[in-house]
Image: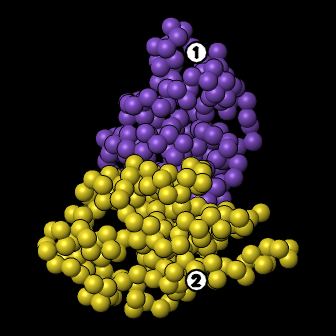
Chain colours: A yellow, B purple
């Protein structure tokens, strides 16, 4: 049986950071940089405007792709059972938008493998690739922390800085599969 | 820590059977009964019309409540961590409709405890209350089969015929909690 991987959407498959910067600039006229907000929570980084942005129609539908995400997910699916696990329930508008976004950018992912949830504590997979420690801290498998401004000062999980590093990290698991 | 229960929506919290009968009658002029379709799959029972119905706007939003569901879920939440786990991904239209249906009938359930998924194989809770063996067969905890026309001939899981029977079955688990 293939090992299972849960993959987060925002900040992992989708590049939320520049999108937040764009929305914040439209609202305030100020262009933030990664340096301005490194180590801050999303709420503090955007002075409470974050939740306003994510409730605007279109925010989730128009998120840019994280570099290398499509190719990497496709590649992982060859050797792993991949689930997309997104904490979408806090923002009800995001439900159809995230579904359509996945259909556009990742049409090769079956609906059986998509999960929109609240907290992720009852998700049981062998690996969780996520940018938020609130999810990684309680996962049942091996946590893999995707680099983001808000986790830059947290070091208690294995960090990956790109999808290339995800593939590199999981290469050994593929090799193990071939040996079995 | 409270034990966890995953609760299915269609056929458990929502009474899908009479709703299917209504839609089928509107389409064909024929009123089916439980006897007509006992033991059949949903697909066979509605001669392939089932999937047509569930893709119609409003189908999931207007589902009637299963008798006793609201009071029982509220009661279980006193002693268990209750998650609503619905296989909604097959029918994308159902995502906002199910969210709104829950907000109307179960406003006391937090978004953190709602999961819309495809298959339920990566959901790990101590109990799963569901009407479909495709979910119950692979669950990580104790499966509890809510009676439905399509599972009437299946006897490999503990069956409950009503929400009153769910509460009765789980009474021992509450008592155990008090003793600890």
Q: As displayed, is residue A87 above or below residue A146?
A: above
Q: Is residue A175 above or below residue A102?
A: below
Q: Point out residue B63 in the picture as x, y percentages from the top left corner.
A: 42, 31
Residue at image coords 47%, 39%: B13
| Cα–Cα gap, marks 2 and 1 | 57 Å
In the depicted structure, whether residue B24 falls above or below residue A167: above
Q: Is residue B67 left or right of residue A38?
A: right
Instruction: Name which residue lies at 65% across and 68% down.
Output: A76
Q: Chain of mark 2?
A: A
Q: Chain of mark 1?
A: B
Horizontal side, residue A1 vs residue B139: left or right? right
Residue drawn at point x = 55 percent, y = 39 percent? B165
Task: Tell me: A51 left or right of A114.
Answer: left
Q: Residues within 10 Å of mark 1 (few under 14, many from 20)?
A: few
Q: Are marks 2 and 1 in contact (CB under 8 Å)?
A: no
Does dot 2 land on a helix, a strand or a loop? helix
Q: Which residue is mark 2?
A: A165
Residue B175 appearing in the image = no
**Rendering coords of residue A44 (x, y %):** 24, 80
Rendered-image quadrant of the C terminus of chain B? bottom right
* Residue bearing the label numbered 1: B33
The mark closer to the camera, 2 or 1, is 2
- Residue A12 or residue B180, whichever sits in front: A12
Observer able to see residue B139? yes
Q: Nearer the viewer, residue B139 or B61?
A: B61
**Residue A138: x, y in percent?**
51, 75
* Other residues around mark 2 within 10 Å, as few (<14) / some (14–19) / many (≥20): some
Residue B16: % across, % down: 50, 30
> In terms of depth relative to the viewer, which is nearer, B157 or A50?
A50
């Amino acid at each position: 049986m293939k090992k299972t991987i849960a993959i987060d959407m925002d900040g992992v498959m989708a590049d939320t950071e520049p999108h937040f910067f764009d929305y914040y600039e439209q609202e305030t006229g100020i262009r933030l940089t990664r340096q301005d907000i490194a180590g801050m929570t999303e709420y503090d980084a955007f002075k409470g405007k974050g939740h306003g942005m994510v409730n605007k129609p279109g925010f989730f539908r128009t998120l840019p792709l994280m570099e290398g995400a499509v190719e990497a997910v496709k590649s992982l699916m060859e050797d792993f059972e991949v689930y997309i696990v997104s904490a979408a329930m806090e923002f009800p508008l995001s439900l159809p938008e995230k579904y359509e976004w996945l259909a556009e950018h990742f049409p090769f992912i079956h609906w059986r493998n998509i999960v929109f949830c609240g907290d992720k504590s009852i998700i049981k997979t062998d690996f969780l690739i996520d940018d938020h420690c609130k999810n990684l801290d309680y996962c049942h498998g091996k946590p893999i922390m995707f680099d983001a401004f808000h986790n830059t000062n947290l070091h208690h999980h294995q960090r990956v800085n790109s999808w290339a590093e995800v593939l590199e990290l999981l290469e050994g698991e593929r090799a193990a599969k071939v040996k079995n």
